[in-house]
Image (spheres, rainbow, N blue to C red):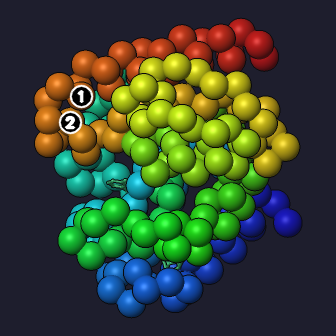
Amino acid sequence: MSKKEVMKAVADEVKACRKCKLGETRTNAVPGEGSLDATILLIGEAPGYWEDVKGRPFVGAAGKLLDTLLSETNLSRSTVYITNVVKCRPPKNRAPSPIEVETCTPYLKRQIKTVQPEIIVTLGRHATSYVFSKSGIKEAAGITKLRGKIYSVKLFGLPVSVLPTFHPAAVLHNAKYKDPLKHDFQLLKTLVAKSQQGH
Ligand code: SF4
Ligand code: URA
């Protein structure tokens, strides 16, 4: 199967999925979108209100901020791949439960293995925990300590640079996260420049 066929199969399964109880309350599942040949894959937490309405990732207020951060990094949505740890909106935007994460992340794993990104940006605690646990890293600290550094890991057999940062939605609740988030996207910019030199 081509990349396109695999990603279409994953998206079709996600849209029909009822494997956890988030499937009962969602309006639309949100598989993810972007370039299947992306160097950079960004992982959020879960769809929110507008994502659930539209079936697309990061289209609400946090998405606007993400678009700004990407454009400041000279990146656009069409050149990256964007998805979430869980594909259906948790009621009232609560955090996904461990069992929901466990049930849903085989989809994310297939997406990562298909896109084969060189760089993974984990937006917030949930995405960071997932990627670290699958890379065999024991995270001894929270996102505030882990963020803003690049971790060279092996994820599903692939060498990747992982950059954990705050979730863009955090900035909407507290402006103090804005500068660190901008800083981390500038770091992403240097990482992208390095990766381009390597080709
Ligand atoms: Fe299926 Fe994931 Fe949606 Fe749960 S959150 S119903 S596992 S797609
Ligand atoms: N927050 C997320 O984590 N993901 C989205 O798609 C939107 C908001």
Q: Residues within 10 Å of mark 2 (few under 14, many from 20)?
A: some
Discs 2, 1 touching: Cβ within 8 Å? yes
* Whether residue 21 is situated above or below residue 158 in the rendered picture: below
Q: Quadrant location of residue 142?
A: top left
Residue 107's spot in the image, x, y percent?
64, 67
- The residue sitting at 71% across, 61% down in the picture is 110
Q: Quadrant location of residue 138?
A: top right
Residue 35 relative to residue 58: left or right: right
- The residue sitting at 14% across, 35% down in the picture is 174
Residue 18's spot in the image, x, y percent?
52, 88
Q: Which residue is mark 2?
A: 171
* Whether residue 136 is situated above or below residue 28 in the rendered picture: above
Q: Which amino acid type is marked by label 1?
A: Tyr
- In this rendering, does residue 70 appear at all? no
- Counting residues from the start of the chain, the first of labels 2 and 1 encountered is 2
Q: Which amino acid type is marked by label 2?
A: Val
Q: Which mark is residue 177?
A: 1
Dot 2: element: helix
